[in-house]
Image (tube, grey):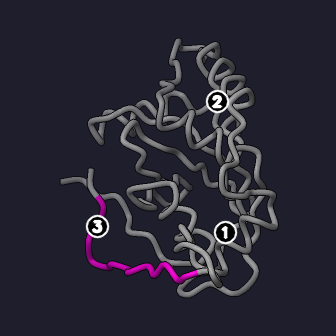
Amino acid sequence: MHADRSSSTKLSTPLEQGGPPSRFSAPVNAALRSAGWQPGRWDIKQAEYWADALRGHASPAGHRHAVFPAAVEAWAEFGGLRITSPGPGRQLAPATLDLDPLHGLHMARTLGDLGRALGTEVCPLGEESDTRALLAIDAEGRVYTLDHTGDWYLGPTIDTALTTLVSGIEPPRLTAG
C-alpha cells in the first residue's frame, strides 16, 4: 500500500514573534497549546503505562500490538491531549483528536494487517473523536487514520499529521500497489 500521490500540500512554518521558528503554524500551535501541549512536554511515565497496557493485551484470537520507540515518543509528547481546531478547515472539517492509544486496544489484528500491507509495524495513537477514526503510527513515525471508508496517510511525522488533521487538509488515501 502507498499513499495516493494525486494531491500534495506544502506546509509553512512561520516565525513566532521574537522566537525561533515554530514546529507548527500559528493555528495548529494555538490548538495544541489550548489542549495543554508546550515545547518540551514529555510524560514518559504515562507513555510507558500505555506501552505496557498494549503489550499486555491479546485479542481472543491471540493478536498482539507492536510497541516501538516512535510510538512511545509520540505518546510521551502528545499523549492524553484532546485537541480541537480553533477555526474552519482548509479542505475538510478539522478533526477533534483524543490522543489516547487505548482507543485502539481492541484493534491489534487490524493494525497488524495494515502493518503487513505497509511492510512495517503499526500501533494505535488515538482517535478522531467525532468520527471514531483510529489514528495509528508506524515504526518509522509515519501516521495514518483508519475509518469506515478506508485508510489514509496523514504524513511522515507526528507534526505533519497533527497539522493535517487540525488544519482540515485532505489526506491521501492508501491504495494497493
Q: Which residue is mark 3?
A: 4
Alpha carbon distance from label 1 to label 3? 21 Å
Query: Total number of numbered labels?
Result: 3
Q: Residue at 48% of width from left, 76% of height from top? A: 170
Name the magenta segment's main secondary structure: loop
- Dots 3 and 2: beta carbons under 8 Å? no
Q: Secondary structure at mark 3?
A: loop
Q: Position of residue 84 (x, y in %)?
A: 76, 69
Q: Position of residue 143 (x, y in %)?
A: 46, 52
Magenta-colored span: 3-15
Q: Amino acid at mark 3?
A: Asp
Q: Viewed as shown, does residue 150 lie left or right of 32?
A: left
Q: Which residue is mark 1?
A: 95
Alpha carbon distance from label 2 to label 1? 22 Å
Q: Is residue 93 magenta?
A: no
Q: Secondary structure at mark 1?
A: loop
Q: Is residue 8 magenta?
A: yes
Q: Is residue 126 above or below residue 58?
A: below
Q: Residue at 73% of width from left, 26% of height from top? A: 45
Q: Which residue is mark 2?
A: 106
Classify 10 Å Cα crowding around label 1: few (below 14), some (14-19), many (20 and above): many
Q: Say whether disc 3 or disc 2 marks the residue closer to the N-terminus.
A: 3
- Dots 2 and 1: beta carbons under 8 Å? no
Dot in front, 2 or 1: 1
- The quarter of the picture where residue 6 lies is bottom left
